[in-house]
Structure formats: structure tokens, C-alpha cells
Image (cartoon, rainbow, N blue to C red):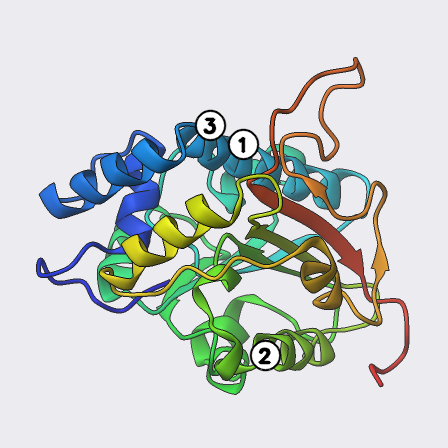
């Protein structure tokens, strides 16, 4: 979710792509990913766990909640298991709008993902909810009068507090129908310590977007007024994972899914 598509600085979206084993990255992104792994050796595992969390959340919404339309904001570079691919395993008619403020991401998404009706990709910024919600491409695919899911996977931690991310999320959830859902995954420093968190912030200060760690309570505030799907805010590796007991490792990324039940947000 960053608009610096040039070669001058590392790009968080491309660093993430590198951690996932993608090929849409450059030397400086791979160098930054290596520096990140030196500080957080389990960062690659956390990135992959985050990707699986988003897939499980989409499958849950399509299969158990009956959601057939999704708005993926800060979609990032395409990798296997994109939102419409997961949703359409359950509902072949699921509709998806991919949104990103990196024109390279949008170009890739249009070429690789928008190959069938009901899927679109366009340039938009999370910091401009009206621009996203009123975009003609979104309106052509998504019916805001019917329940939809807003997906904010690993993107809010690039939005600093001065940009009022809680208000941005409120604007998005207020615009969708009751019965809609919000999916969020977000980096946290609760298990990595202040020193490591500081080194990661310094690393991303050299990139095209900052890294903002938030606590479990701060992530929970994004769901204010929504009904959290059990187990609530959790390590992404554990959210709706296999029923057998498992050790998800330390928490680097938190995830949650919330439902809008009220007729109008306060």
C-alpha cells in the first residue's frame, strides 16, 4: 500500500512479496528483507501466516457468512491465493474489487487477476475512503447496499497515527450495509520487544512507508461498534486454524474479523 514504485527506496509491498517468495521485487527490497530477517528471523513465517489468515477469513466469510463481495484495500502484488480465487472456490460468482495506491500493483492485478467478469482493480488510497467507495470501477462490481467484506490485510500498519487510521476504518465500515464484515491483520510488537521493534521502525523509515506497531488493544479499537467473530483478536497463525492444538509461535501479526450488526454506525 505504497505509491513509490521507483527503484530508489525499498517498498514495503515488494518486501512483503519477497518474504512470500514472490519475484516482483528488486535488489533493494531483497536487501531490506534480509535486514528484516536478521532482526526478526520469523518474519517470513509471519508473512506466510498472515497470507493464510486472509485466505481462511475469506473462506469463512464466503462459506459460513454468505458474503459474496469483497473490497481488498492495499491488495499488494498478486501471489497465489488471491481474494477472488479463494472466494470463488466457494462461490463462483463472488465479486472482488482490488485497490492499491501503487500503480505497478494495479497494473499487475489488472493483467493477472481481472480476467473474468466481477473482478476489478483500480488505483485508490486507504487514506481517501470516499475516493475508493465512489470509484466507478468499484461501483460497477460492488453493491454497497448489500453486505460486503472490507479486507485490510497487513496495510494499516503503514498508516501512522497522524493520518487517523481509526477514522478511515470507520468511514469504510459506515459506508457498507449492515451484515457486512471487516477483516484486519496488523503487525504488533507485543512479543518481539522494544529493541527489535525499534530496529524494524528504523529499517522502514528508509522505505517508502513507515512501520507502525500497534498493541492488541489498539487493533481491537479498529473494530469498535462491530461484533468480533470468535476467537476475536488473535495471532494470525491461530485464527480459525486446524482444530487440533498447535503452537503458533510468537505473535508478530494480529488478525481479526468483525461484523457490522447495527443499522447505522454511531
Name the side, left or right, on which 100 lies relative to 153: left
Few, some or many C-alpha atoms within 10 Å of disc 2 (few <14, some 14-19, many ≥20)? some
The residue at the point 19 percent across, 39 percent down is: 30
Residue 57: percent from left, percent from top: 67, 42
Vertical placement of residue 129 versus 112, above or below: below
Kindly give the residue lying farthest to the front in the view shown. 195
Q: Quadrant of the C terminus?
A: bottom right
Residue 76 seen by the camera: no
- Circles 3 and 1, Cβ within 8 Å, touching? The answer is yes
- Asked whether 108 or 100 is in front, the reply is 100
Residue 68: percent from left, percent from top: 68, 52
Pair 2/3: label in front: 3
- Circles 2 and 1, Cβ within 8 Å, touching? The answer is no
Q: Quadrant of residue 198?
A: bottom left
Distance Cα–Cα, label 2 vs label 1: 26 Å
**Mark sitting on residue 49:** 1
Q: Quadrant of residue 27?
A: top left
- Asked whether 69 or 80 is in front, the reply is 80
- Asked whether 144 or 167 is in front, the reply is 167
Q: Which residue is mark 2?
A: 168
Q: Which residue is mark 3?
A: 45
Kindly give the residue lying farthest to the right in the view shown. 262
Distance Cα–Cα, label 3 vs label 1: 6 Å
Residue 162 seen by the camera: yes
Q: Quadrant of the N terminus?
A: bottom left
Distance Cα–Cα, label 2 vs label 3: 29 Å
Residue 214: percent from left, percent from top: 59, 59
Few, some or many C-alpha atoms within 10 Å of disc 1 (few <14, some 14-19, many ≥20)? many
The residue at the point 75 percent across, 32 percent down is: 240
Secondary structure state at the residue bearing disc 1: helix
Q: Mark 2 or mark 3: which comes first in sequence?
A: 3
Vertical placement of residue 181 versus 178, above or below: above
Amino acid at each position: 500500500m505504497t505509491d513509490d514504485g521507483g527503484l530508489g527506496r525499498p517498498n514495503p509491498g515488494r518486501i512483503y512479496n519477497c518474504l512470500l517468495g514472490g519475484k516482483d521485487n528488486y535488489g533493494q527490497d531483497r536487501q531490506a528483507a534480509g535486514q528484516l530477517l536478521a532482526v526478526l528471523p520469523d518474519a517470513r513465517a509471519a508473512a506466510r501466516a498472515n497470507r493464510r489468515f486472509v485466505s481462511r477469513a475469506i473462506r469463512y466469510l464466503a462459506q459460513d457468512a454468505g458474503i459474496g463481495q469483497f473490497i481488498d484495500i492495499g491488495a499488494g502484488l498478486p501471489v497465489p491465493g488471491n481474494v477472488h480465487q479463494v472466494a470463488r472456490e466457494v462461490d463462483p460468482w463472488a465479486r472482488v474489487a482490488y485497490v492499491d495506491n501503487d500503480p505497478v500493483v494495479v497494473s499487475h492485478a489488472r493483467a493477472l487477476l481481472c480476467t473474468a467478469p466481477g473482478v476489478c482493480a483500480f488505483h485508490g488510497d486507504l487514506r481517501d475512503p470516499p475516493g475508493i467507495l465512489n470509484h466507478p470501477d468499484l461501483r460497477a462490481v460492488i453493491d454497497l447496499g448489500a453486505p460486503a467484506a472490507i479486507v485490510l490485510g497487513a496495510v494499516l500498519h503503514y498508516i501512522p497515527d497522524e493520518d487517523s487510521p481509526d477514522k478511515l476504518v470507520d468511514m469504510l465500515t459506515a459506508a457498507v450495509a449492515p451484515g457486512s464484515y471487516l477483516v484486519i491483520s496488523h503487525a504488533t510488537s507485543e512479543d518481539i520487544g522494544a529493541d527489535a521493534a525499534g530496529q524494524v521502525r528504523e529499517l522502514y523509515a528508509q522505505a517508502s512507508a513507515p512501520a507502525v506497531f500497534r498493541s492488541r488493544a489498539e487493533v481491537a479499537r479498529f473494530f469498535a461498534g462491530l461484533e468480533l467473530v470468535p476467537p476475536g483478536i488473535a495471532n494470525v497463525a491461530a485464527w480459525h486454524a486446524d482444530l487440533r492444538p498447535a503452537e503458533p509461535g510468537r505473535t508478530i501479526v494480529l488478525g481479526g474479523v468483525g461484523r457490522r450488526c447495527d443499522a447505522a454506525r454511531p
